Image (cartoon, helix red, strand yellow):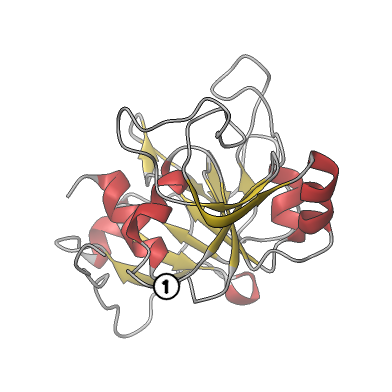
């Protein structure tokens, strides 16, 4: 299984029926593809849409149906559209149950950096600052390393998205939580040892006596 699929499938297991969930660009957009059949999740895009479905198949895209990054999305029966003011009112008002974002770095206290200087790596923070601050739960979907360098670090060298710590980071190697500001290894990916995770991580991780493997679930 490729790393992006593994991450998206694991994060989908964090969602519960009836949740209002925002998916960021990149790996987070794949999460909608792995929601269990029959479970109704209300996916929200900050450009003004609730009711997004899986990424449409080739040839089934509609030019007017896009996510906040301009990428094609599908709309489920009952979906609704509205303006950006309403969309950010939902985000800033604390109505989102979960937001799933990509990350460039997360420090050992759970602080996220997912933007940098315009024109480099990503163009800017977009709505990430509002999402991390306003959502009830924040999940980061990212690969464990970039060009051989850890992305989970002692201290972020890139600008922080928010001072509020994230709740969970899911990578292709591990699931890490940040309860009480402590980075804690919760799960390892299939075939990955605890020591391999520690070696690939730039932050100090608390390791429980028993660390289970990520559950592998069938396609929805």
- Residue lying furthest bottom in this view? 209
Please name whichever residue, 151 or 49, is drawn nearer the observer in this view of the structure.
49
Please name whichever residue, 209 or 103, is drawn nearer the observer in this view of the structure.
103
Residue 198 seen from this side: no
- Pointer 1 local density, CA inside 10 Å: few below 14, some 14–19, many at least 20: few
**Taking 176 as reference, is 87 above or below it?**
above
Residue 22 placed where, x, y %?
Answer: 60, 54
Residue 10: quadrant of the picture: bottom left
Relative horizontal placement of residue 129, taking residue 145 as reference (left or right) = right
The residue sitting at 58% across, 25% down in the picture is: 122
Relative horizontal placement of residue 100, taking residue 210 as reference (left or right) = right
**Taking 12 as reference, is 173 above or below it?**
above
The residue sitting at 27% across, 70% down in the picture is: 214
Residue on which the image places disc 1 = 39
The residue sitting at 26% across, 78% down in the picture is: 212
Count of marks overlaid on the render = 1
Q: Is label 1 in a helix, a strand or a loop?
A: loop
The residue sitting at 35% across, 53% down in the picture is: 33
Relative horizontal placement of residue 174, taking residue 69 as reference (left or right) = left
**Taking 187 as reference, is 116 above or below it?**
above
Residue 211 placed where, x, y %?
Answer: 30, 78
């Amino acid at each position: 299984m490729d790393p992006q699929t593994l991450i998206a499938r694991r994060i989908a297991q964090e969602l519960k029926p009836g949740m209002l969930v925002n998916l960021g660009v990149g790996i987070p957009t794949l999460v909608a593809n792995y929601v269990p059949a029959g479970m109704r999740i209300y996916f929200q895009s900050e450009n003004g849409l609730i009711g997004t479905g899986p990424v449409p198949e080739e040839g089934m895209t509609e030019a007017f149906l896009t996510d906040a990054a301009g990428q094609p999305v599908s709309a489920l029966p009952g979906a609704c559209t509205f303006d950006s003011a309403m969309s950010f009112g939902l985000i800033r008002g604390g109505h989102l149950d979960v937001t799933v974002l990509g990350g460039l770095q997360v420090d050992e206290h759970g602080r996220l950096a997912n933007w940098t200087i315009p024109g480099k790596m990503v163009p800017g923070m977009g709505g990430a600052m509002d999402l991390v601050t306003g959502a009830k739960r924040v999940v980061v979907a990212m690969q464990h390393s970039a060009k051989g360098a850890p992305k989970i670090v002692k201290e972020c060298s890139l600008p922080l998205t928010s001072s509020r710590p994230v709740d969970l980071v899911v990578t292709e190697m591990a699931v890490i939580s940040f309860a009480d500001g402590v980075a804690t290894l919760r799960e390892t990916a299939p075939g990955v040892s605890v020591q391999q995770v520690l070696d690939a991580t730039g932050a100090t991780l608390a390791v429980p006596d028993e660390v289970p493997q990520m559950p592998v679930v069938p396609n929805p």
